Image (spheres, rainbow, N blue to C red):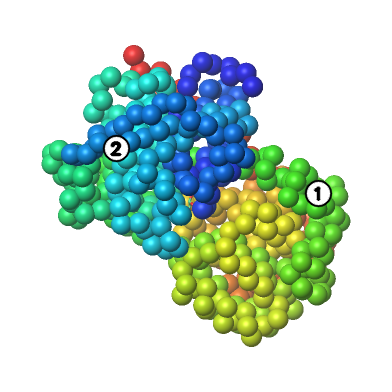
Amino acid sequence: MGNSNNKTILFAASEAFPFAKSGGLADVMHSLPKALSKEYRTSVIIPLYQFIDKKKYGISSLGENTHVIMGKNDYFIELYGCQYEGVDYYFVYSPSLSDRPFMYGPPEEGYEDNAHRFALFCQAIIQLLKQKHFDLLHLNDWQSAMSALFVKEESSIDTKVVYTIHNMAYQGIFNKDTLDQLGLHHDYFTPERLEFYGDINFMKSGIAYADGITTVSPSYCGEILSPEFGNGLDGFLQFHSSKLKGILNGLDDDHFSPQKDMLLEKRYGPKKLKDKYINKKLYFRSIGFNDPEKPLFIFIGRFTWQKGIDILVDALNEMAQMPISISILGEGDLKYRQKLAKVALKHKNISLFFGYDESVSHKMYAAADFLLMPSLFEPCGLNQMIAMKYGAIPIVHGVGGLKDTVSPLEKFDAKADIGYGIVSKKKSAEALATSVQKAVSLFDDKKKLNRIILHNMNVDFSSRKSAERYSELYTELLQNSP
Ligand code: GLC
């Protein structure tokens, strides 16, 4: 792939598809560097978790064993690498970072030494920057945020830094002693720097020290400046708001397209919409459901309060009494798994799948008529865009990225380049059940239904659009460099 300029960008994050994925961050770390690789030489660095399949992806040691010093200790690190779809991937191996069954900890729990693990990851990024020049370092979420400060401390490194916030609810907050473990001077323990209500906050490093800050949708960008969505950092963000921009995420067109999707037994597109029904029948057979004529509602996501799982659990009983089928895929808190299992036991039209499986999720989008996504807040959200591409209508709350990608059906305009779905302002189980009722009526009006589905399938949700916006930001920042 030819790059039209010779600038180099290094993305850093705690996960990237297809190597390690727990959520949308991983998808963005796949699609964005790939989309930008037409213009830049792009690389991505993530930890080398023990479950990453080195053989499958041809990941090998770069022969660069090195060590980093943090606090009083010296830590062994080894860099690995591979190429994937035109992007260079780097992987950091270090025993305490890598030799664990999970990325962050067992479901809904973090490992106790995560501050140390991810600070080590951030130091490994600095080691790479010392060996190899990158024009710009693009950090994502709290796990890589500390690199922003480390870069500014290293006078030998000349790189611009962009920091992207994918979710304000996860900031990387640890107790004050972490400062010594990380070998950071106590001068950093001030409210303008890393201090946060007596603790230290990794995200603050990204916000305070990056040259540019972005978040993943324009609406969320406005929301996080208010106490309701700022999770205690709204004031701090307001102070740094001249550096802040909202850039909507996009999807990788090759991976999320019903025409090209190799995970589907029957591919289809807007011109062959009938074939979507074949996918529905196949999916129904695989989970032992009858009645593919009835609308299928799916939920895919982590079982956390952010995703509106409480609302879903409370609405399920009423929903299950409607003439519909419901299929749920996800993982998370035992509390939620138990609640879901209890309702599902009572109703034959609810199927549950605990765990995460990329292939099952694609088959579900292809089979679905509606996507349930009652998130209480949503920085961007990719599921609603995937659903629309696959011809399933999203049912959402008008917040964050959902607001920017899904317009209410009542405002349908065939010419607008935005998707349409069932949007509710109220966030409650009753409101969700009402939305589902609306969906059932829409399902009976086949002419209207098809018009909306076809419109949504043709909307451009590709990461090319976000790549253009990031490219503008990089150009602006790189122009100001000496
Ligand atoms: C986080 C957010 C989600 C966003 C994703 C990728 O998972 O919760 O809204 O789409 O990051 O940016």
What percent of the width, then of the height, locates residue 144?
37, 40
Q: Residue at x 28, y 19 (%)?
A: 156
Image coordinates for residue 372, horizontal then vertical, percent:
61, 65
Residue 272: image location, x then y, percent:
86, 50
Residue 290 sits above or below residue 39 on the image: below
Work out whether residue 250 or residue 223 is closer to the camera in this orientation and state it.
250
Which residue is found at the position 42% from the left and 48% from the top?
99
Q: Which residue is mark 1?
A: 267
Q: Is residue 199 left or right of residue 45?
A: left
Q: Is residue 211 visible?
A: no
Say whether residue 80 is left or right of residue 182: right
Q: Which residue is mark 2?
A: 75
Amino acid tagged 1? Arg
User: In the rendered structure, which amino acid carries the disc numbered 2?
Assistant: Tyr
- Which-is-in-front pick, marks 2 and 1? 2
Residue 35, placed above or below residue 421: above
Marks 2/1: CA distance?
Answer: 49 Å
